[in-house]
Image (cartoon, coloured by chain):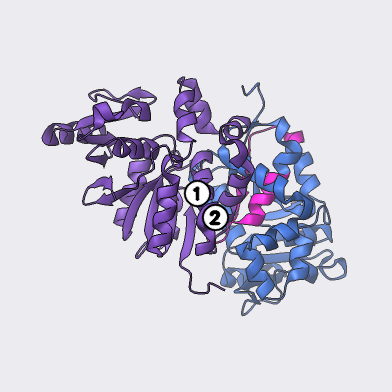
Chain colours: A purple, B blue
Amino acid sequence: MSSGKPSLHTCLSPALLHLYDLRGCLVVIIDVLRATSTIATAIHNGASAVLPVATVPRCIELGQELGGITAGERDGKVAEGLSYGNSPFEYPESFIGGRLLVLTTTNGTKLLHMALDNGAQEIVTGAFVNLSSVCDHLVERNMPVVLGCAAWKDRVNMEDTLFAGAVIDRIGRHFHLNCDSSHFALNLYRQAEPDLFGFMQENQASHYNRLMGFGLEKDIRYCLSTDKANILPIFRNDRLVKA
Amino acid sequence: MSSGKPSLHTCLSPALLHLYDLRGCLVVIIDVLRATSTIATAIHNGASAVLPVATVPRCIELGQELGGITAGERDGKVAEGLSYGNSPFEYPESFIGGRLLVLTTTNGTKLLHMALDNGAQEIVTGAFVNLSSVCDHLVERNMPVVLGCAAWKDRVNMEDTLFAGAVIDRIGRHFHLNCDSSHFALNLYRQAEPDLFGFMQENQASHYNRLMGFGLEKDIRYCLSTDKANILPIFRNDRLVKA
């Protein structure tokens, strides 16, 4: 049945991560709106690394210690004490080139640290803007994969699931898919694929509504576009660097 | 936005139930393959009640105490010490009419007790075989609803999600849907609806594979058919009875 292919699972929420044995696995952290889109963009535009941290105080502390740019939002605004936000448009090459970005996000950072604590062998981040790099890497590595959706406060969300579906649509044939969540994601993506933005709008995706309420349509459209920042962020030591 | 309609959420796994405030809610327990299909069938065929219990020893104990039929499976076989299994075909009117069924299942019973412990105001069970009864009741009650998928050992599954989608497809317009899981379920159902069995097969749904491996195609086909046992089991005191 598995015919020697490595397994691929989709974990729809951090609250389900304990169901998967991550040891020996490559885990893809997915937080499409907007953490992993911004991480790929910053590194694509020349950031030396992105250091993901869980809290605002830790972000400030590490920013000072390491001379990095501190960034992060809470409730749609730049968090107090930090200098920049979560938008990929804040990190053009002219600004971020050669610099370290210390970024605090809630859902994505939490999942990344959970994956580490649970023994993941390798961690990369994925978003539509670096879809091809992620897919190429997974096929090349040929090891068990868990696609980890960061979700929103543990609630399953549309855009992260769609990205998991996009990965499976491209490279699922190289893996043994034996979880229903992967089939969900794939089916959802195939329905949405002709117009991801329209699909999010039509289905009133919760995060779509939240960001549209902050006037961030441009960000959403960018985060749903393919290969605009097509590099692979990989987690080494305490930070994400270009693979 | 909500225009006074009650909310409807879909909880894809018991491991996500803590995200929902169940107080004042009507919770639909969904375990299509096969617990809630069998419960509806037994009550439709005249069982006086179904008493859901968590463990085999408790099932034996209550069966003796109350003079009920003891039933339940573990790993696809009638559990040691019990008399019958989980198949709806074991409970025709000639056998179950007027009798109490003490049923132990793993996923569905666990979720039902979790919903109770978390303050659900009303609990009913749903499956395709009683889809119309469930939908009519939800519209009539006009209160906040959580569609609770029993899943499989906390892993999201195809058939329970499809049933949630079927409910939303029929009566979603009477509710305020503000969770992405509900939109997933609805989209999945609309894709699958022309041929639920074929969809399960094509997507290699994990539970489909498990039951097919036990030679239970007939059960699966029955459990995916609509309104074959169209009554509403409602939880009162410690048991499910006809509403």
Q: Position of residue A211 (x, y in %)?
A: 47, 26
Task: Identify the subunit bearing mark 1.
Answer: A
Query: What is the x, y in percent for residue A106?
Result: 35, 37
Give the residue furthest to the right: B94
Based on the picture, tell me whether residue B160 belongs to the magenta stretch: yes
Q: Amino acid at mark 2?
A: Ser
Q: Mark 1 highlights which residue?
A: A164
Report whether mark 2 lies on the same chain as mark 1: yes
Please name the residue shown 53% across and 72% down the image.
Answer: A2
| Disc 2 target residue | A182
Residue A69 image point, x, y percent: 21, 30
Tell which of A42 and A28 is nearer to you: A42
Which numbered dot is residue B55? none
Residue type at numbered disc 1 = Ala
Q: Residues within 10 Å of mark 1 (few under 14, many from 20)?
A: many
Q: Judging from the image, what secondary structure is the residue with disc 2 in?
A: helix
Residue at image point 66% right, 56% down: B159
Report whether B231 appears left or right of A123. right
Horizontal side, residue A71 vs residue A152: left or right: left
How many numbered circles are shown? 2
Q: Quadrant of the N terminus of chain A?
A: bottom right
**Magenta residues, start to end:** B139-166
SS label for mark 1: helix
- Which class describes the residues within 10 Å of circle 2: few (<14), some (14-19), or many (20+)? many
Question: Can residue A18 be seen by looking at this rendering?
Answer: no
